[in-house]
Each structure stands twice: as structure tokens, then as C-alpha cells.
Amino acid sequence: MNREKSPQSDKKDHGSRLKEITAVLHRNNISRGVTPEKLRIILEELGPTYVKLGQIMSMHSDILPQRYCEELIRLRSNVTPMKFEQVVEVIEESYGDSWKSVFSSIEKEPIGSASIAQVHKAILNSGEKVVIKIQRQGIYEIMSRDIALLHKAVRLLPPVSYKGLVDLDMVLDELWSVTKDEMDFLMEASNIEEFARRNENVAFVATPYLYREYTTRHVLVMEYIEGFSVDEKQNLLENGYDLTEIGSKLVDNFLKQVMEDGFFHADPHSGNVKIRDGKIVWIDMGMMGKLTEYDKKMIGKAVQGIAENDIYMIQDAVLALGQFHGKPDQGQLHEDISHLVAKYREVDIGSIRVAEVMQALMEIMKENKISMPHGLTMLVRGLTHVEGILADISPEISIVEIAEARIQAEFLKNFDWKKELKHSGNLLYRSVHKAVNLPMTVDEILQKYLRGQSKIHLDLHASKELERLLRRLVRNIVMGLWVMALLVSSSIICTTDMNPKVLGIPALGMFGYLMAFAIMMYVFIKHMLTRKK
């Protein structure tokens, strides 16, 4: 399926693609700045590669400002479909046989056409209705070429990063890795099977049946879901569904995926959530988020901290989850989180939007040079989609309330009374033991102080403004001492009859005066520039 190209052909392709990119950028007046909306339009015009990259970048709120991520979520999935002849060619190349050996019929018009693949309804020779997901012909080569061009573009840029957190080459490598995974339909098949296994005991959740025997890296075959999209409110109501019940169960299952499984649907927009026979059916498992046990525990702690307005609980979770770029200023972090919590302190818990709070929290982390695990940024995107669905079908439901109830239920379910009693007993014993020794310890400290033997170690942290002020102060004092020393020494030299002379004054003395004048001018100009800033 992948054809080798000559170096000359490859260079020609790169050159023509660069012309296309340049034309799109000129057409959108990129020289006048790039607003979030303009960025989305540019990516859509640049084609499938950039649409997919934009969709993945929308999950990177640890890199892009929030307003850009929100706009990129709106990137259109639908693109011009492949011709049916190309669809047949991809299927037959994958199977090494005629498509009629597997399917009795395939509908020519696709039911969906996205940047990487398109979907067609079909009927198997055995009679079952299915959907076939077919990878776009040549998409791997197109995306590989565009990523290579982006790498070249990055090398032409100065070695700077967004707020010290981003290595653009590393970001492109990660985006390419995620995209390659999504282009491997065998991996998506594994995701479907794992998701089905983890949710098999949830009575109100279903997963499309996967026809593994007909699935390859470029073709995926699964059961056709005849139902309603979760946002088809009128159809759902006419068929006897309770929208509030659907919303509650949707949130509960999504939180179960996050907090119990650590394996969750990372793109749960309304098109990927169907309602059939009283069950929620999750489809399109190409993009899944994964969290470690530790990540789950800390995220639960952060959600609980938000629900209880507990600044220290949130800060502990942030410090535990984050990757630091430099020494963290815990005082500044605490102050920033305090402002965030104060904003929501008077807000009713039922009206708190978790995705909005977590997005604001990630902005705080960016400001404090703390980056988050990729799974967490995918979670923020997922929560944004889920809250969007809730706002449409059942706005009275609160994710925070359901999450807090789930945390408490999990705590009671996993609570080990014997272990906790033993742990509490040990703590009580140590506390009593230390309390008995406390008067003796205080007496020793006072005795050392009275004898002058005590030492105090202070670890002082100054703000950046104070640091700059102190640096300027010390610099000006040092410069003043230099000026004074030069003036005194030059005046002494001028009282002598030292040769050579300039205008009747010893040259060395004249040089000292000039140096003192130059330093004074430097300090004066520096002071004026600082005042303007």
C-alpha cells in the first residue's frame, strides 16, 4: 500500500506542499497575528494532517492558552470523502481478496468522513449489519511528509519555548506518535475489547461488537448501532427516555472510567455517544486516555478539594501530579490556588463546572512552570465534552456532586476497619509518647539558648520584584563606591606634577575623572530606563 518515492519526487512534493501552506497563510493574513478562530480556519484549509494535529493540540491545555484549545475543539471532523473506488482498493489491499468475499453489500455514500478515515454501512455475507472504518488512502505518507516539514520549520525558529515548558520538536514527536496509534486500527480494536471488558458488569453501558477476524491495520469492522445520538432530545423523549437519567448515568460511567479504570474515552462528544435499548453505547475508541493508580488517587483528591474548598488538598494534588521546570515557589502557588478557590467559594456546588475549574487550575500550573501528565490534559478535554452534553440534555446535573458521592462510596467500600484501627492506635501511641517528652525537649532548647549554643537556620524566599530591587540597590551602591574612589584618587593625582599632562592636568587624573563621569551617566540612564518600564 505504501509506495517508495525517489528523492527527486520527494523534494518536488515538499516544494509544492510548501507553496500550498504559504498560500493559505498569506490568504489568512498571518502577519497580522493569529487569533484562535484564525488558527482553526488555517488548520481546516491546510487539510487532514493539520485538522488532526489541531484536534490533538486541543487536548494540550498545558501548552496552548485555554481560548485556543476551546476553539480547536470545534475543528470540523467532516472532510471531502474518498471515492468509492479508493475505498474498495483499500479494503481489497488489506484483505488480499475481493471485498465480496466478506461483504454482501457496501453503501457507496459514507455515513462519516474524517481526516484519517471514513465510515460506510455494510452487510456481511452472514447477514449482520456492520460499519466499516476505512483508512484514507495514502494518509500515512501525507501526514509523515507534513510532520517532516513542521520539524524543518521548527529548526528555523529560535530555540525558545512557551513559558519555558515546551520543546516544539518534542511536541511534534508526541503528536506524530499519537496520530500513528490512531491510524493503527488494530490498536483501536484492542481499545474496544478492553473497554468492553472493563464495562461488562455495567448494566446500562454497551460497546459495539468487534469483528476481529475482518479487522486489519487499515480496515475496522464492527456492529452497526441503530439508536439515537445522545443530543437527539426530541427523539429520545418521544421514545420514553428520561434525559436526567441518561445524563446521570453518562456522568457516573465516565467518572467510573476515570476514577476506577484509569482508561477512559478521550473524545466523548455527542456523535460518539449513542442510546440504544435503554443503554449508553460508546463508539469510536481511537483516542483513549490512560491514568496510573497514583494519578487517579491525586485527581480524586483534587476533585474532593474543589468540592470542599480545601486549598491545601488541591495544592498537595498539584505538587504530587506535576512535573517541575525549576524550583517551585510554593508560596506563589498557594496564593494562586487561593484566588481560584475564592472565586468558587460562594458558588453552589451544583453549578460548578469541573472542566472549567480544572482548566483554570492548569493555567495556574503553567504560570508556575508546572507541566501535567498527558492523561490529565486528555481528561480535561473529555470533561469539556461531557459537560457540553449535560448542558444540552440535563443542565441541572452536577459532575462535582456525583464525583464526590462516588469518592465517598469508594472510600466506604474499600475501608479496612482493622487496618485503620491499628494505624490510628500506632499514631495515638507515638503522639502520647512524644507529648510526655515535650517538656524535656523544650527545657533542652531553652538551656542551649541561654548558653548561646542554639543555632537557627533560615530559608528565605524573596519575590522576583524584591530580588530585582535588591540587585539594583547593590549595583548602585557598588557603582557609587567606584565613583567615589575614582574621584578621590584622581583629585590626589591632580595635586602632583605627574607627566604626561592633558590641558595642564595629569593624564591619569583626567582618565579617572572621565571614568567616574561615564559610570555616573550609566547609572543615570539605567535608572531612567527602569522607571519607564
Image (spheres, rainbow, N blue to C red):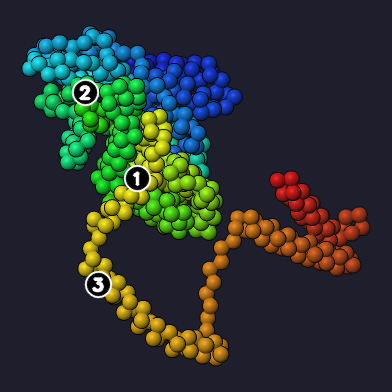
Q: Is residue 29 above or below residue 326?
A: above
Label number found at residue 99: none
Image-based side of 211 in relation to 267, left or right = left
The one of 252 and 55 positioned closer to us in this rendering: 252
Residue 128, x across and y down, in percent: 12, 19
Q: Picture coordinates of residue 518 (x, y %)?
A: 78, 53
Residues under labels 2 and 1: Cα distance? 28 Å
Mark 3–mark 2 Cα distance, whole angstroms, equals 52 Å
Q: Give the residue number, with chain letter if any, for mark 3.
A: 422
User: Along the polypeptide, which appears first: circle 3 or circle 1?
Assistant: 1
Earlier sequence position, callout 2 versus callout 1: 2
* 355 w.r.t. 483: above or below: above
Left or right side of 445 for 51: left
Q: Kindly identify which residue carries mark 1.
A: 402
Task: Residue type at mark 1: give it.
Answer: Ile
For the residue carrying disc 1, how many other residues have a C-alpha within 10 Å: few (<14), some (14-19), or many (20+)? some
- Residue closest to the eye, 299 or 236: 236
Is disc 3 surrounded by few (<14), some (14 to 19) or many (20+) residues within 10 Å? few
Q: Is residue 141 above or below residue 477?
A: above
Q: Which mark is residue 225?
A: 2
Quadrant location, the N terminus = top left
